[in-house]
């Protein structure tokens, strides 16, 4: 197996440059039907899929499943708003590493509070902030990839001749995979903590309700008890 290391690294860095970000301004300002949604997503994110000739960015089945699992609100009269598209873009990036249940946990509070509200701070505000923040990560990602590549090139110096190249390629994959693995664990940990908050609130609410019910029953029981007759006073 012959791999040109410099060509490989250059290709990887070039692929990072091809990552597409859909700016808020690029999202249509009118509601779209399903076919229009899939066409828009495919057109804007085609360059980022693994096999551009075969892989689909988004399908009708996917969108229906997302709505069925409450990842996005249902369309209005079969049309999807700009905010629907923003949620679908978030889902597109999440689904490669997170389960449907995890994505639901992450998006549910956002959707409930910020979807289709008329406040100055809304879902679009969140979308813009996240996209800007992600774009700022690109240079750091490139530096990290180059660092891991250089580290991998320093490995397996004592391996038999003819196997070093592949083993260094394997080491590079291992370093990148470990990075993804650790970050995935951290993301899952954060999501588990997010799940605890509603559960803790629910449990506290149950305890509070039980306490109020107990007090209510005590008061009702006290009303039903016959008044104690006062003992007659003795005459002097």
Image (tube, rainbow, N blue to C red):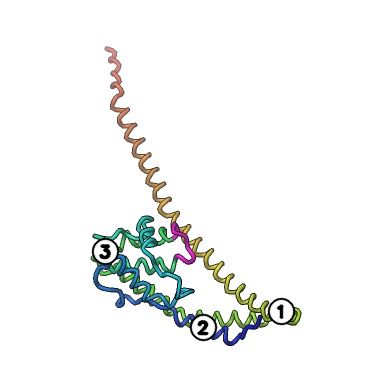
Residue, far bottom: 6
Residue, far front: 53
Estimate the spatial distance between the alpha carbons at disc 1 and disc 2, rounded to whole Å.
Answer: 25 Å
Residue 233, horizontal then vertical, whole percent: 28, 15
In the image, is residue 141 part of the stretch drawn in magenta? Answer: no
Residue 78, horizontal then vertical, whole percent: 26, 61
Q: Which residue position holds label 3?
A: 79
Sequence order check, earlier mark of 1 and 2: 2
Q: Which residue position holds label 1?
A: 163
- The residue depicted at 64 percent of the width and 75 percent of the height is 170
Assign a secondary structure to mark 1: loop
Up-down relation of residue 145 to residue 178 (above or below): below
Q: Residues within 10 Å of mark 1 (few under 14, many from 20)?
A: few
Residue 27, horizontal then vertical, whole percent: 30, 74
Highlighted magenta segment, given as a residue range: 95-102
Sequence order check, earlier mark of 3 and 1: 3
Q: Is residue 82 left or right of residue 147?
A: left
* Circle 2 or circle 3, nearest the eye: 3
Q: Which mark is residue 13?
A: 2
Up-down relation of residue 84 to residue 165 (above or below): above
Q: Are marks 2 and 3 in contact (CB under 8 Å)?
A: no
Estimate the spatial distance between the alpha carbons at disc 2 and disc 3, rounded to whole Å.
Answer: 38 Å
Q: Would residue 108 be seen by someone viewing this image from the given angle? A: no
């Amino acid at each position: 197996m012959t791999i040109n290391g410099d060509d490989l690294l250059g290709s990887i860095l070039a692929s990072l440059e091809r990552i597409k970000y859909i700016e808020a301004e690029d999202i249509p300002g009118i509601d779209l039907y399903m076919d229009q949604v899939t066409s828009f997503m495919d057109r804007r994110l085609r360059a980022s899929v693994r096999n551009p000739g075969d892989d689909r960015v988004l399908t009708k089945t996917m969108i229906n499943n997302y709505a069925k699992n409450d990842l996005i609100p249902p369309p209005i009269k079969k049309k999807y708003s700009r905010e629907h598209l923003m949620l679908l873009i978030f889902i597109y990036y999440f689904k490669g590493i997170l389960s449907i249940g995890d994505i639901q946990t992450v998006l549910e509070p956002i959707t409930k509070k910020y979807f289709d509200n008329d406040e100055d701070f809304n879902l679009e505000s969140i979308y813009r902030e996240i996209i800007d923040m992600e774009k700022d990560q690109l240079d750091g990602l490139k530096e990290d990839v180059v660092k891991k590549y250089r580290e991998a090139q320093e490995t397996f110096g004592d391996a038999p001749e003819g196997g070093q190249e592949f083993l260094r390629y394997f080491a590079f994959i291992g370093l990148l995979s470990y990075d993804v693995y650790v970050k995935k664990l951290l993301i899952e940990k954060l999501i588990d903590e997010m799940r605890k908050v509603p559960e803790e609130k629910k449990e506290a609410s149950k305890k509070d309700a039980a306490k109020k019910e107990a007090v209510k029953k005590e008061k009702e029981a006290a009303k039903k008890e016959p008044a104690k007759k006062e003992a007659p006073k003795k005459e002097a």
